[in-house]
Amino acid sequence: MADNLHEKLKALRNERNWSKTEVAKRLGVKALSTYANWEYGDRTPNPKMIKEIATLYDVSINYLYGLPEDTNSGNDERDFLNAISDPELKRWYLELPKSKEEDLLKLRKMWEIIQNEDK
């Protein structure tokens, strides 16, 4: 995750002269503190919310994460979805961004355990 995501969120909001309350409302975030913590760098939005933020500000996800712009990013995702032959894997891929941040953290820990099993 980009170290300066919180700085970009604040800059994008300030460019539009929006308050934190207004941005939280536009994103459908119920608690202002949730959005504020993203800007303070105390918490990080989940992947689904990153997409929402990118859409709101009309920027790429790569920009938010501080990654190089990939002109083929839309094609890569489309190609990946077409390449998935296992319907269960495809469902996982499509549903994962909708998950709660806490669940994603648990999944990440489980994945780390699996990766370190043979070591």
Image (cartoon, rainbow, N blue to C red):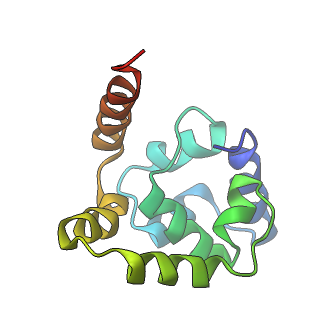
User: 105 or 38, which lies in front?
Assistant: 105
Count of marks placed on residues: 0
Q: Name the residue at 36% across, 35% down.
A: 105
**Residue at the farthest left position:** 88
**The N terminus: image quadrant:** top right
Where is residue 70? Give x, y as percent: 75, 73
Q: Residue furthest top?
A: 119
In this view, the residue in front, 82 or 4, is 82
* Residue 101 at x, y percent in the picture: 36, 44
Residue 81, x across and y down, in percent: 40, 78
24 shown above or below 55: above
Q: Nearer the viewer, residue 68 or 20?
A: 68
Tell me the quadrant of the picture where the C terminus can be found: top left
Q: Is residue 13 above or below residue 70?
A: above
Compared to residue 23, the image places residue 103 above or below, namely: above
Quadrant housing residue 61: bottom right
Based on the displayed image, in which of its 4 quarters is residue 6 positioned?
Answer: top right
| Residue at 76% from the left image edge and 47% from the top image edge | 7
| Quarter of the view holding residue 8 | bottom right
Q: Residue at x 40, y 59 (%)?
A: 29
Using the image as rendered, state which of residue 67 and residue 18 is in the foreground: 67
Single out the residue that lies furthest toward the front: 118
Residue 57 position within the rendered picture, expressed as x and y whole percent measured from the top left: 66, 74
Q: Is residue 116 left or right of residue 92?
A: right
> Is 36 left or right of 104, judged from the image as shown?
right
